[in-house]
Image (tube, rainbow, N blue to C red):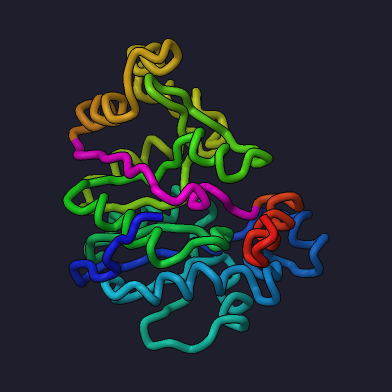
Amino acid sequence: MEDVPLSQPAGWTALLLAGSRPGGDPFAIANGVALKPLIRVAGEAMVRRPLRALLEVPGIERVRVLAQEPEAIAAVIERDARVSILPSGATIAATIEAILRDPATRFPLLVTTADHALLIPPMIAQFMAGAAGADLAIGLVERRKLAARLPQSQRTWIGFKGGSYSGANLFAFGSAEAVRAVALWRGVEQDRKKGWRMLVVFGPALLLGAGLRLRTLDQSVAAIGRKLGLTIRAVEMTDPLAAVDVDKPSDLALVEAIIAGAA
């Protein structure tokens, strides 16, 4: 990928989401652990990989690991003064909303997930640079880039004029005002894999524009921002591996092959 300076303005707080599904996760259990972030990837608990990447980016001053079972996560993480492991809410959106509403929260915030096993510092640095100054920023990967790198990868795509995009599990919140977007997200969180449900929330004009490919990604994001009174930015990631997470057995096999240099 392109060289991106790792040096960033100081003051970022990273939230690493290491939650678990209510009632147990069959994927985790099949891999001999109780929680998905504890699944071993290339010989170590998966949560350790994105955490290590976050700690290697100079602009990130602190990392808050959020989990429903913080003791289990703490047991596999090395001690570091910059890291705290805290209880999370029942859902991702509820957790983020509570943090944004907390007067003690320090901005900007970077959010990623424990299953982002291929996350590396240059990805984080690029995203932080692109997100600077926005109330809300979302990392995305364009379909053709990922298809060229991993034609076998299966993802959920949202189409716009000029391209289709999938999420990179990277979010940034530059101000507490972004809570307005998260509050809407809560209403469709269980359908987050269905892109049209996310678009419906923002009105028929945006839905039609995306469905007919009448608007580009940036135009659509700008329209959402105007509706919410926020500065929202889509950050297109250079490295298509930013779109790869570990959500099922085939993902785990693919990620381990990539780490081993076999894919």
Q: Is residue 84 above or below residue 78?
A: above
Q: Position of residue 238 (x, y in %)?
A: 39, 48
Which residue is nearer to you in this view: 165 or 209?
Answer: 165
Left or right: 241 as drawn, with respect to 33: left
Which quadrant of the figure contains the C terminus?
Answer: bottom right
Q: Position of residue 202 (x, y in %)?
A: 35, 24
**Residue sitting at x 48%, y 75%:** 52
Left or right: 21 as drawn, with respect to 157: right
Quadrant of res 40:
bottom right
Residue 13 magenta-highlighted: no
**Residue sitting at x 26%, y 25%:** 219
Task: Give the magenta part as a residue range.
Answer: 230-246
Quadrant of res 80:
bottom left
**Residue sitting at x 59%, y 75%:** 73
Which quadrant of the figure contains the N terminus?
Answer: bottom left
- On the question of residue 76 being in view, the answer is yes
Which residue is nearer to you in this view: 96 or 45?
Answer: 45
Q: Position of residue 65 (x, y in %)?
A: 47, 70
- On the question of residue 86 being in view, the answer is no
Q: Is residue 182 above or below residue 10?
A: above
Residue 243 magenta-highlighted: yes
Q: Is residue 79 above or below residue 119?
A: below
**Residue sitting at x 22%, y 70%:** 11
**Count of marks overlaid on the render:** 0
